Image: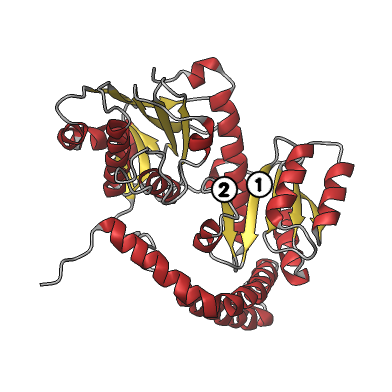
Amino acid sequence: MTKEPDAPAREVYSMRSEVALDLPAASVVHDLRNVLCGILCCAEHALSSLPDGSAARSDLEQIQGVAERAASYGKNLLTNARDAARDHLRSFDLDDAVRAIEPMLRRMAGDGLPLDLHLRACGAYIWGDPGQLDQVLVNLIINARQAMPSGGRISVHTRLLKLSSVPRCVVLRVRDTGTGMDERTRSRAFEPFFSGRAEPAIGTGLGLANVHALVRSAGGRVAVRSRVGAGTRVTICWPCVAVGDDARVSPPPVSYTSLRRPRVSQTVLLVEDEALVALAAQHHLASAGYHVLVARNARQAQLLAAQHRDPLDVLITDIALPGSLNGCEVARAVKALHPGVAVVYMSAHSRAWLLRQRLIAPTALSLDKPFSGERLLEVVVQALAEARLASATTLPPQAADAGR
């Protein structure tokens, strides 16, 4: 009987298979997605301005439907077995979920390592797959154990964080007293197949990459703090969907659009060389109340950023741009002028492809083309919410020390 490959081996095989498929198909799919993005966004914008009884509405809906089918064909060319299943998504109590797997976590830690649980989320519910939370915790506990070859202590903290500047969020923090990481290692911690272990046989380099992917798929964010000799602290924040009795009925997934409506004063710099895509995206953003600056190339984007005296709130840039600079380099230049700007990358390539090419960081927000106007607005509001959350969780000492 043929032995079934283990999970890391299946992951490697899946990624190699996708690379092989990408080579002949990526160029065609890239161009197709750019065209379809403009068609879908324009059709959606036109539909939103028509009354229900309009004679043109049916034709536009037909155009929208055909474009969506074409988009799904292109996506299927590059889809792989790693796409996350959404069948098990629901709201659940974070503390209860951690308690349910406490015996397994203690086995993962091993007999020689104390594992302390400080569960104080006070009945807070998050939205996601409880099975994926199990994977997140197991990965973090195994990482912590491997960082303490001479012994130490692992602690798991939860709490409900309430700050006036951001929506309620639920925090999970895993700390160890191990060897820690230098800044270079910490900055690459979420990269797939990167391992900071001295022994190549220890670790696959997939642990924190998997943690990051699972957390982001549930609408959360994750950060790592570490110092050599001082241990590591991994902090995860999810939007809180309900607390206590309010969670008796499972609510729908939290939409970032519903968490924070855009303010008219917020400014978006949009960098897109495809005229139809730029026009449609500008329409959707302006209709939602944003002030939109549009650049068709990297040079225009840098000029607009330099001329804009007020803070820029969001930069949305295509990765592939005409000229010598790509969207990543544009983002660095704009952030140098506006350090607080939130960045969203657009691409007709898949996010997996961008990560493999190391064009974007695993923590970066990206928008796959073709996208709908609703999806565009959702990602923009998510970027703003994450920027506020990052600021709130790093600046106030009481927030930064939460769960200690």
Amino acid type assigned to the residue bearing label 1 in the image: Val
Q: Residue 122 at what x, y percent from top left?
A: 32, 25
Q: Which mark is residue 364?
A: 2
Could you tell me if the residues under marks 1 and 2 are in contact, i.e. CB atoms within 8 Å?
yes
* Left or right of residue 124, residue 111 in this image: left
Q: Quadrant of the C terminus?
A: top left
Q: Residues within 10 Å of mark 1 (few under 14, many from 20)?
A: many
> Which image quadrant: the N terminus?
bottom left
Mark 2 crowd level (few <14, some 14–19, many ≥20, 10 Å Cα):
few
Number of the label disc, if any, that sits on residue 205: none
Residue that carries the numbered disc 1 in the rendered image? 343
Residue situated furthest left in the rendering? 1
Question: In the rendering, at what x and y percent does residue 22 appear?
Answer: 51, 73
Please say if 350 is above or below 206: below
Identify which residue, 146 or 106, lies in the foreground: 146
At horizontal 32% and vertical 44% (from top left) the residue drawn is 203
Evaluate whether residue 288 shows in this view.
Answer: no
Q: Earlier in the sequence, mark 1 or mark 2?
A: 1
**Closest to the observer, 395 or 20:** 20
The residue at the point 21 percent across, 24 percent down is 113
Helix, strand or loop at mark 1: strand
Q: Residue at x 25, y 22 (%)?
A: 151
Q: Residue 248's quadrant in the figure? A: top left
Q: Is residue 98 visible?
A: yes
Give the quarter of the image for residue 242. top left
Element under disc 2: loop
Please give the name of the residue rendered at 59% of the width and 52% of the height, measured from the top-left corner: 360
Q: CA distance from mark 1 to mark 2?
A: 8 Å
**Residue 225, image x and y in percent?**
47, 28
Q: Residue furthest front?
A: 199
Identify the amino acid type marked 2: Ala
